Image (cartoon, grey):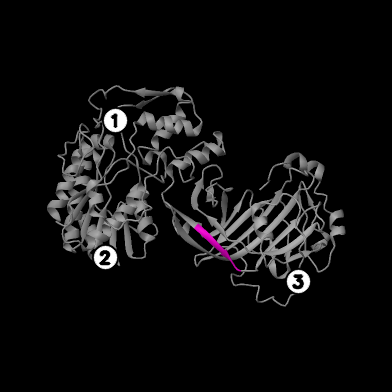
Amino acid sequence: MIKVLVTGATGLLGRAIMHNLRADSSVQVLGLGYSRVGEGVIKCDITNHDELKGVVEHHSPDVIIHAAAERRPDVAANDPAATEHLNVAVSANVAGLARSVKAALIYISTDYVFDGTKPPYEVTDTPNPLNLYGKTKLAGEKAVHENNQRSIVVRVPVLYGKVENNKESAVTVLIDGVKDSLNAPKKFEHLSKRFPTHVENVAQALNALSKWVASADNITPIIHYTSTEGYTKYEMACIFADILGIPRNGLIADTQEPQGAAAVSRPKDCQLSRNKLDDLNLDMKEDVHFVRLRSVSEPSTLKIRDMKLLGAAAAAAAVALFAPAYAAEEDIYGTWSSGSGGVQTGEGFCTPQEYSFNIPNTTGTSYSFTEDGYYEEASYKFRSNATHPQCIQAVLTWQHGTYEFYDHEDMQGIKTTPFSADGRVQVEDPCAASSNILSTTSFNHTFVKYLPFDDPVKNIKALQLYDFDGSELAPLYLISRQPNMLPTSPISTQYSKRSKRSTDEPVEGDVDADMQNILATPSLERRKGGGGKGGGGGRVSSGGAGRGANVTSGNHSSAVSNTLPISLAALVIVATSIAIV
């Protein structure tokens, strides 16, 4: 295990570094924050030599990642003394303190050390910064190498990711301008090409670098890490506008050079070459890939004000720009439910020992995941029948078992394995020979991808699951971080003596794929019957569902048929040929 100390741990990049390293059991990480503290982060003023010295000597890290800096060119130009002190003097001090405890140093620098005239830039190319920000970062590079021979400089371009506000990144800040263009035309610079790179990808590379520099004898002094897609600010603004459904006619491409003494010069094209990094052949997982700005299929955590005015669909598409390449496994722990949360796992939905369901007032799906690999699912769906529109099925499903994460191409997915014979499914169909059929079931489910995100419309944690074919399922919303589940141990052996009744009668109607799998299971045991708790009798109406559907031995299909109209006249209008989930 290596010990890593991170400066600037509460910033955009610092948070991603902390998140990545804390998820790695081979790394012990401590973050330093100037004004904020949190889990794994302590308060420390790194500009105070004695305060920083005490922290470094007390924790004696193997590697220090120095991510703290003044990174805004305009701010740097307006306060050169403070910028030079933080970017140069403090960096030299961090390097010296790292040397005093025999720690390696990773110094985060910028592509702005180059003038942008001859891209792509190799690590051996001569820097020529155009503005004060670039000059102080270049001076910082020299300072860390002079004060610690075990220092490595990592140059990165403009970064984006899970922002706390849009102004935290030079990429996301453009969204505010795009929204403002609805009221008046807005200019966006169309001269300089930037290569926006996701902080999660940078963090993953820094993880691999940390392990390498901790034991390497000959450290490469400089490497470059970057994405490969270049955009001007105007081009990025157009992408944002398209995703948000905002007309482009309010966006103006500004091709004028900066004017006036206060204008900060910026290089035209500072594309970095990754050749040196690739030559190191570090142990980096294949899941390190670059999140493309034009990808609009994945939700994440972008903060966009007034998103309700744009609609939920636009919100989901817009936040896709900032989805990390990989979600953290711990992000799925808890109980999740779709829609209004009417369907939830745990007590109240299914009593598997009694082969009974309590029908919720609304349809929906719920999943719970524990930290130690157990899951539970609950589902209530209406399924229409295009051939016989009046034959609308109500399907309730419950399962529990174990789950595991797995790698799928460049994504991470989830595989569920239910406890055999523990699952329960109930199908209510007014057109079937037996209108209320209860069965045991056991079917695996594969989600090729999962992505937790903060829903900007509902202002709640959400989870997007992708089915085996890559299609998006309905988003789930966090009900509780403490999983709400029935006992996670198998129950089938405990109730093996319970009387069961089998039948080979098929369930009629347009059964969904899950039900086809259920009916094809050789060990399927189906129960017929009706009657409900409190006299509900399993009755379903367009406005909701009755309580009950407790099944007893015997065939009560006739009684159930009489109490299962599902308010067909009203329900068919909204459900014909449509699967309501």
The residue under the point 28% across, 65% down is: 2
The residue under the point 52% across, 41% down is: 316
The residue under the point 56% across, 36% down is: 311
* Secondary structure mostly seen in the magenta stretch: strand
Q: Is residue 360 visible?
A: no
Question: In which quarter of the view is residue 576 placed?
Answer: top right
Question: 243 above or below 208?
Answer: above
What stretch of residues is rendered in magenta? 414-419
SS under mark 1: loop
Marks 2/3: CA–CA distance? 63 Å
Residue type at the position of mark 2: His
Q: Position of residue 361 (x, y in %)?
A: 72, 52
Reading the image, the residue beneath label 1 is 192
Tell us which disc is closer to us: 1 or 2: 1
Q: Which mark is residue 59?
A: 2
Q: Mark 1 or mark 2, which has the lower sequence index?
A: 2
Q: Position of residue 286 (x, y in %)?
A: 36, 54
Q: Position of residue 317 (x, y in %)?
A: 50, 39
Q: Residues within 10 Å of mark 2 (few under 14, many from 20)?
A: few
Question: In which quarter of the view is residue 4 placed?
Answer: bottom left
Q: Are marks 1 and 2 in contact (CB under 8 Å)?
A: no
Q: Is residue 472 left or right of residue 106?
A: right
Reading the image, the residue beneath label 3 is 500
